[in-house]
Image: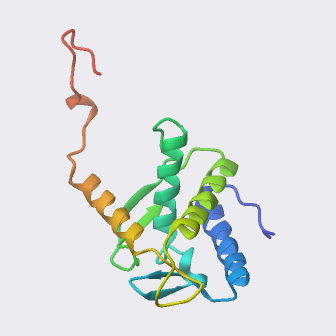
Amino acid sequence: MFKTKLSTASQAVPMALRSWCELQSRASATPFIFTVAGEEIPNASAATEKGLLPLICWHADNIYRFAMGGRSMGVHFKTSARALSGFAVDLSRVDKPLSEVLCFMVEAAEDILKNSPASAAKPGAVEIEGIVHRFKADLEEHRQRPAVSQGSMPRDRKGATS
């Protein structure tokens, strides 16, 4: 399937999601499986940094946190005016086993596809405007929170950090 050995999430996740999009495109016989506010997102660009990759990574991390007792996979986001969602994803700090990360990424993509409403604009596609808004709101909320440094963590009565 892959011609080169993939050793990091930064390499493997986009490739795996591109393959997943191609399979979905063939299965649905349409070059568009997602729409946002009626605008078609080509399958070829859905798994790119400018496409839906940040959204899928965010959803995968949420599923991972639910399944793994609140721990994150290690994905990080930054603002990007060029991205469809307004955010870019950094997978370079993901420290989980690659097979585990890929399973959660594909699960997130499948979950979005299976649980999003049908698109009124494009038969065979799903409308993901709702999850895009939740993604943006969640990242904006996290950005507004002040960062807690190790030195300013709450302390109990004995002076230990909690």
Relative to 132, say whether 145 is above or below: above
Q: Is residue 48 visible?
A: yes
Image x and y of residue 6, in percent: 71, 60
Q: Residue at x 28, y 31 (%)?
A: 150
The image quarter containing residue 157 is top left
Q: Is residue 2 left or right of residue 31?
A: right
Q: Is residue 116 left or right of residue 106?
A: left
Q: Position of residue 61 (x, y in %)?
A: 49, 52
Is 107 situated above or below 151? below
* Image height of 116 relative to 35, above or below: above
* In the displayed structure image, the side of residue 110 where residue 60 appears, left or right: left
Q: Colour scheme used in the picture?
A: rainbow
- What residue is shown at x 66% (from left), y 51% (from top)? 98
| Depth order, front residue of 99/104 | 104
- Across and down, in percent, residue 30 comes to 64, 89
Tag count in the figure? 0
Q: Is residue 93 visible?
A: no
Quarter containing the C terminus = top left
Q: Residue 124's quadrant in the figure? A: bottom right
Residue sitting at x 57%, y 62%: 111
Quadrant occupied by the N terminus: bottom right
Where does residue 34 sit, x and y in percent of width and height?
A: 52, 80
| Residue beneath the point at 57% across and 70% down | 113
Q: Is residue 104 above or below residue 129?
A: above
